[in-house]
Amino acid sequence: MTQKNALTVIGFALLALLLASGGQRLLAEQSGSASAPSLISYQGFLSDSEGDPLPDGNYSMTFALYDAASGGAKIWEETQSNVALGGGYFSVMLGSGTCTTGCPLGPATFSDAGRYLQTTVQMNSGPVTFPRQQMASAPYALQAVEAQTAQTASSAPWSGLTGVPAGFADGVDDVGGEYENVITVAKSGGDYTSVAQALNSISGSSSSNRYLVQVMPGVYSETDLVEVKPYVHLRGSGPNATVVTSSRTGAGPNNSAATVDLADNGRVSDLTVRNESTTNYGIALYSAETSRAAVVDNVVAEVVESGGTAHFAAYWNDAEATIRNSTLYAGGAGTVNTAFGSVNISGGFPRALIEQSILLGGAANSKESCVDNLASGYGMQLSESSPMVRDSYICGGHRGIALATNGHPQVQRSTVAVSTTTNAYLFEMTASGSISVSNSGVQYSSNKHTGPGTGLRCVHNYHVGSHQAASDGTSTGTACN
């Protein structure tokens, strides 16, 4: 039995029809999240010299792709040994057989124009090879996988593009369009291995020339002050991954005793800042002469060693920097430990904003709670300062909030607690200032207030533990009982 070229004519006609109707299928074999489509649907009809379909059964067929209608180079070839034939018709998925040349079928197979499919059918009398067919355009969709990486794009003009992120049209990848300059700090492979040196390299930062200093995971022990300049964002890889630490100390609470100094319009986020000083003053985060435009976000600031005069997790000197989503912890026996300290030196009442944060000041090394800590810890230690605290937890081993001179701190939707140790008081006011607490929880054993100040104001509060309402009032005698 012999065959005429019905396969070529009818097979191509079906392929062309499928292409025209959108029926040509490119199927993807999924591996991970995405991979190159690797199968092409192909159909045909086999008949004898009289035009009658060949008997039903399974036939071995070989398919090959060439770069020319005749002669030329073979690009790809495979054999499918059990092609089912019914009524003369067959249907195969090219790319699913045993590949012998140009494996696998993929984007590289159609990387050039002009591909011709040659089909060979194994008959009892031997192989019969039919004339080649030029492949239609749909299989070239395999080449579209290159767009996933754009490795072959020679150019892409900015003109006419829409949806370009702000700050990106200059051709610089500014990490979301916010930064004109990016510096990396890493234990190896970065621009710098020291956080302080990276920040010291910056000059000319401004609202139109912002810097991101990205610190990779690791512990970075610094000797010099880590100075976050205006319009510079110091960002770690998470508080549990990136730690910036020092043992810097000074005779007073200033930046000589600090690990990190935050300037106005600067930002610190996603890292741990630690001070391990054992003498004089030790400060993790320090800020001076700043507005609320300076931001601390998702930071753990801690002082953890014993000894010295005083420890501050954060110390604001005439500063109003914003603290969000952070933990301030001051611990270590034998010294004063304050989670947040704020003072006024130049005049006025600095109004820092603290939101969704934890402030713990105590002698024991516990970051979970200070309620059972020993004396000498302060949640907040203030002088002529009026911070606003919202949705936060404040606890001190010695004082919850201590207001030395004037000022009017406000606490909203938060909890203020103090330890049960002797002489531990929830509030201390030693001058003419006042403390306002509203819609919050208060936790103390029996010592609510000490000092000559009388301006304690409580509205809609409750006692933590018992959940009993705390009394409203505008004096130390009536408020928060």
Image (cartoon, rainbow, N blue to C red):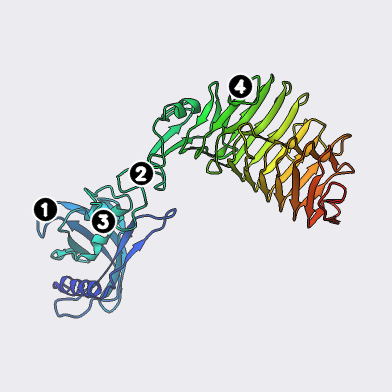
Mark nearer the N terminus (3 vs 1): 1
Q: Is residue 113 left or right of residue 359?
A: left
Q: Please tell me whether mark 2 sits on a helix, a strand or a loop.
A: loop
Look at the numbered discs 4 and 2 and tell me whether their residues touch, using CB distance below 8 Å.
no
- Residue matched to label 4: 248
Closest to the observer: 431 or 280?
431
Q: CA distance from mark 3 to mark 1?
A: 21 Å
Q: Nearer the viewer, mark 4 or mark 2?
A: 4
Where residue 366 sits, quadrant-wise, is top right
- Residue matched to label 2: 173
Residue 283 rendering spot, x and y as whole percentages? 64, 28
At x 27%, y 54%, the residue is: 107
Q: CA distance from mark 1 to mark 4?
A: 75 Å
Q: Is residue 61 left or right of residue 330?
A: left
**Mark 1 residue type:** Gly
Mark nearer the N terminus (1 vs 2): 1
Mark nearer the N terminus (4 vs 2): 2
Q: CA distance from mark 2 to mark 3?
A: 27 Å
Query: Residue 143's mark?
Result: 3
Query: Residue 72's mark?
Result: 1
Quadrant in which the N terminus is drawn: bottom left
